[in-house]
Amino acid sequence: MFKSLAIVLSACLLCLAATAAEPLWQTQVHAPAPVDNPLKGLVPYAGAANPDGFPHSMEFSYFPLSAVLKAPGRYDWTVLERFLDQVAGRGHQAVLRFHVEYPGKTGSLPPYLLDAGVGLTRWQRASTPPRPPVDNETPDYANPVLRRALTDFIAAFGARYDGDPRIGFITAGLLGLWGEWHNHPRTELFADKALQAAVMDAYAQAFRKTAVLLRYPAGEADPVYVANAGSRFGFHDDSFAWNTLATKPHYFVAKLQAAGALDAWQTRPIGGEIRPEAWGKVFDAEPGLAALQDFAQCVEATHVSWLMDSGMFKAGNSLERRERAIAQVRRMGYEFHVTQVALVQQAEQLTVKLQIENRGVAPFYYPWSLKGVLLDSSGKLVREARGTGVLAGILPQAAPAAREQVFDLAGLPAGTYRVLLQGENPLPKGQPVRFANARQDADQTGWLTLGAIVR
């Protein structure tokens, strides 16, 4: 046995002694995790990434409510199904939002609601120079027919899609410009707190598994928004690195502070969008934008997991910008490092003991399983095991979390077997969660090699 083990070691396989006594812990070497780990990082508009685009795991799209809601209680999900299937076919998860008004576009509100008497206020909204003003159509949010249609839609949406592995995150949408919960500067046109609460309640009832994010944190004293600090919704900062740090009361972190929600990230995801004026430029050493806030500071302050951005998915980015972006984006969300491993072999059972730390800024928010496999000397998978713990709940800067997997070795022939690990993505073609370890992908793409046993 010892001769065989020496051969394995000389072949550069990290073997861990398997004993029936105390576990023999082996320290694991850290290395940066892949930047396109699932449910984190930069998010392009669906299908917009060029072939040499930035590595990513999610794609975003807006949808007018009229694309799905056709009549009271009648929904046509074709356009959403097509989008979800296309994104999933690329191995990605979706971020999505529905809206009933979008600057420069018409027809977001289902026609039957207009026929039912829901009024529209048509007005011009200024755009960021040098773009000209655009026309906008704001529905009468006080109309009870519209209010009922919105809550009924959310119930149907959740009944069909809650827990769908094709969806990463949903931004609540449905109210305000772009579904972004404001009608600036025509603030008098925005939805009242009663409708906001009804929409939030509908989402809370309809979506128990898939994370839903709100645009603005709000406490009890907020003059515009219904209190949400005690809810289970996450938040999305759609002016990231521009109106993020708490230098003004209406900036994102200041609103988190005022709402008493600075620690919301520990259980609720934070996402958003890099301010369009800063797309790509935010990663330059000299961005040349006076209003731009430091990206790294914004990441640390918000504990953000994902951000929409189009700049890094267009041709023409310099190698320096790309490298800086990869380094900065890798800090977003989680980064799991297996710090120590012990393989304990007793009779016909192998117990894999793990210590996992989170070197990122946020936890993982879904209960994805840890999956282990044994490979024989030819690389054939001969055993599988799923651990007793999940990836969710491992907080940054906390002590390493203990996880364990047990393999049944009964009937396994004599030989050397490599032990591999990954976080299992429920999306069939989705990327697994990969680790910040030097032996990630060492023997098989998508898998961390933990060591080997000899039977």
Image (cartoon, rainbow, N blue to C red):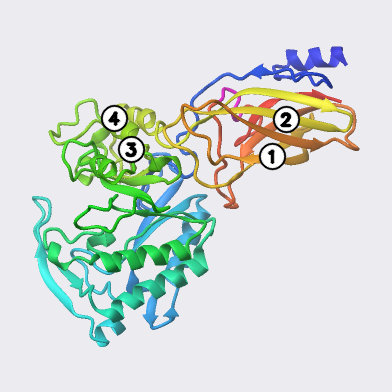
Q: Return the x and y of residue 232 as percentages of the image width and height.
A: 43, 52
- The residue singled out by tag 2 in the image is 352
Q: Earlier in the sequence, mark 4 or mark 2?
A: 4
Q: Return the x and y of residue 313 as percentages of the image width and height.
A: 34, 43
Please give the label number shown on residue 302: 3
Q: Are marks 4 and 3 in contact (CB under 8 Å)?
A: no
Q: Amino acid at mark 1?
A: Gly
Please give the label number shown on residue 297: 4
**Residue in the foreground of this view, choosing between 130 and 177:** 177
Residue projecting furthest to the front: 220
| 161 up-or-down from 339: above or below | below
In space, the residues marked 4 and 3 are separated at their CA atoms by: 9 Å
| Element type at mark 4 | helix
- The residue singled out by tag 1 in the image is 387
Q: Which residues are magenta?
A: 437-441
In space, the residues marked 4 and 2 are separated at their CA atoms by: 38 Å
